[in-house]
């Protein structure tokens, strides 16, 4: 029904059941109160929407356009028990007052949301910190192998040979060969080995010199180094 139709029906029924025209008629007084409550509900869009929704008229109140005859959505009233009828009237009174106690309770208190978030973040952080100990026992003293300063193997001076991919011994006070000298040596002695390598990826400025364990350094295969070492020893 349109608002004008509701208002006209309200005025008509209010005049019919008004206490001044039905003095001492208890039933008329009850009807008049029901008319007032019904008009209070149907005259406001929000309350009208709740009313329509409760009657399963529409999932969105009166904003949805559906052709439903009055008998279709009120026929169950005739099958109501007195208790159900009173419960329905009480429900309409609550709707008219803007109250709803038939909604499901909130799954949690919204005002405690920050505490829930902080608790969740804190729990995740704690698990991330403690997980290495729980699964791998990383705090255990035996988790890492003990470090030993093994002095039983002497260190020798060596340079890294990028062609042979190994460390080669280098006598004291003798400079390592330049990359060009080393590559020229391998072109003469092992040309097939040098052809397998991409020369563009090999060092071009200088070779790396370092002290490594004697067992990890091979004898130098670059002959001019030995000759230079012997000359240096003879001069001393």
Image (tube, rainbow, N blue to C red):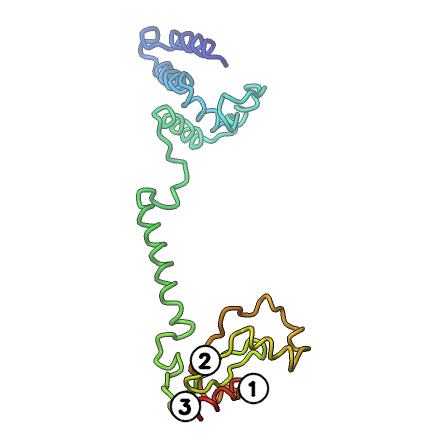
* Rendered image: mark on residue 166: none
| Residue 223 position within the rendered picture, expressed as x and y whole percent measured from the top left | 56, 86
Residue at screen point 37% across, 90% down = 151
* Rendered image: mark on residue 223: 1
Q: Residues within 10 Å of mark 2 (few under 14, many from 20)?
A: few
Residue 67 placement, left or right of 215: right
* Rendered image: mark on residue 175: 2
- Mark 2 and mark 3 lie on one chain; the one further toward the N terminus is 3
Residue 228 placement, left or right of 201: left
Residue at screen point 34% across, 25% down = 97
Q: Of the residues tagged 3 and 1, which is closer to the observer?
A: 1
Q: Residues within 10 Å of mark 1 (few under 14, many from 20)?
A: few
Above or below, comparing residue 128 to residue 167 in the picture: above
Residues 109 and 47: in front is 109
Q: Residues within 10 Å of mark 3 (few under 14, many from 20)?
A: few
Using the rendered view, name the quadrant where residue 7 is placed. Answer: top left
**Tag 2 near tag 3, CB within 8 Å:** no
Q: What secondary structure is marked by label 3?
A: loop
Report the residue marked by disc 3.
Answer: 154
| Residue 58 position within the rendered picture, expressed as x and y whole percent measured from the top left | 52, 26
Q: What secondary structure is marked by label 2?
A: loop
Q: Given the current orientation, which residue lies at the most extreme front position?
A: 235
| Residue 193 position within the rendered picture, expressed as x and y whole percent measured from the top left | 65, 78
């Amino acid at each position: 029904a349109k608002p004008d139709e509701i208002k006209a029906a309200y005025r008509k029924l209010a005049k019919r059941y008004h206490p001044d025209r039905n003095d001492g008629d208890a039933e008329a007084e009850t009807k008049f109160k029901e008319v007032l409550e019904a008009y209070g509900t149907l005259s406001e869009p929000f309350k009208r929407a709740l009313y329509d929704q409760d009657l399963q008229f529409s999932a969105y109140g009166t904003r949805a356009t559906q052709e439903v005859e009055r008998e279709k959505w009120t026929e169950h009233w005739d099958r109501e028990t007195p208790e159900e009828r009173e419960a329905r009237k009480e429900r309409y009174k609550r709707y008219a007052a803007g109250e709803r106690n038939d909604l499901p309770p909130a799954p949690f208190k919204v005002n405690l949301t920050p505490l829930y978030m902080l608790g969740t973040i804190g729990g995740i952080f704690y698990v991330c910190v403690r997980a290495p100990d729980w699964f791998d026992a990383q705090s255990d003293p035996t988790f890492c192998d003990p470090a030993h300063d093994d002095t039983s193997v002497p260190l020798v001076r060596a340079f890294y040979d990028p062609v042979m991919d190994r460390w080669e011994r280098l006598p004291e006070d003798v400079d390592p060969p330049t990359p060009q000298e080393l590559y020229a040596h391998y072109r003469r002695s092992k040309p097939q080995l040098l052809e397998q390598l991409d020369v563009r990826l090999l060092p071009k400025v200088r070779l790396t010199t370092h002290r490594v364990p004697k067992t990890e350094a091979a004898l130098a295969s670059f002959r001019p180094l030995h000759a230079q070492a012997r000359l240096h020893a003879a001069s001393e």
